[in-house]
Amino acid sequence: MANHFEKERDKQVQAARRLYCYRNMMPLLSTVLFLFLFQPFPTYAQPPYAKWGRLAMQETMKRYPNAQIVDYLHVGRKQKTPTTSEETFKLLLQEGNRRWALLIHIEFVNQTEDVVNISYEETR
């Protein structure tokens, strides 16, 4: 009978040790869980031409109010003068059965980002 009580006491001691071990680990586990769940999500920076792309689409919709913009492509940026640059975008437009491409050139002052000129060029 004493052997049965010793086994039962050993089980209780082992259970108490596990509980003590788990209780000591709780702050660590809580911290890890908190950091994992509440880490900030990565933010993706917009490309430097995003502002000009929005402007190109807004101005295109004003100029061609019945057309839909089907596709959009940033062609590139080039230095026009020592103080100005030009962003170029190619938009694919559709109005009814007609489809055409439109190049939009936005010239702006590098320092202030003030728009100097916007020009349009219909292409195929």
Image (tube, rainbow, N blue to C red):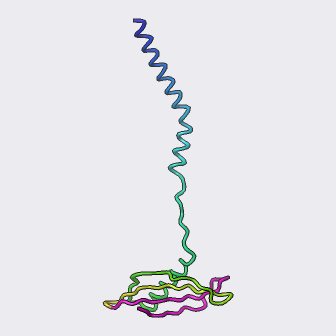
Task: Please name whichever residue, 81 or 119, is drawn nearer the observer in this view of the structure.
Answer: 81
> Residue placed at 32% from the left, 89% from the top?
96
Above or below 106: residue 5: above
Magenta stretch encompasses residue 26: no
Q: Is residue 99 left or right of residue 79?
A: left
Q: Which residues are magenta?
A: 98-124
Where residue 12 appears, x then y in whole percent?
A: 46, 19
Task: Please name whichever residue, 91 or 64, is drawn nearer the observer in this view of the structure.
Answer: 91
- Which SS type dominates the magenta stretch? strand
Above or below 13: residue 124: below
Task: Please name whichever residue, 17 or 79, is drawn nearer the observer in this view of the structure.
Answer: 79
Q: Quadrant of residue 43?
A: bottom right
Where residue 68 appears, x then y in whole percent?
A: 38, 85
Where residue 37 appears, x then y in whole percent?
A: 50, 50
> Residue placed at 62% from the left, 89% from the top?
80
Magenta stretch encompasses residue 108: yes
Q: Is residue 86 left or right of residue 64?
A: right
Above or below 54: residue 32: above
Quadrant the N terminus occupies: top left
Q: Residue furthest top?
A: 1
Where residue 17 appears, x then y in whole percent?
A: 51, 24
How many marks do you count on the picture?
Answer: 0
Above or below 37: residue 3: above
> Residue placed at 62% from the left, 86% from the top?
79
Quadrant the C terminus occupies: bottom left
Q: Quadrant of residue 93?
A: bottom left
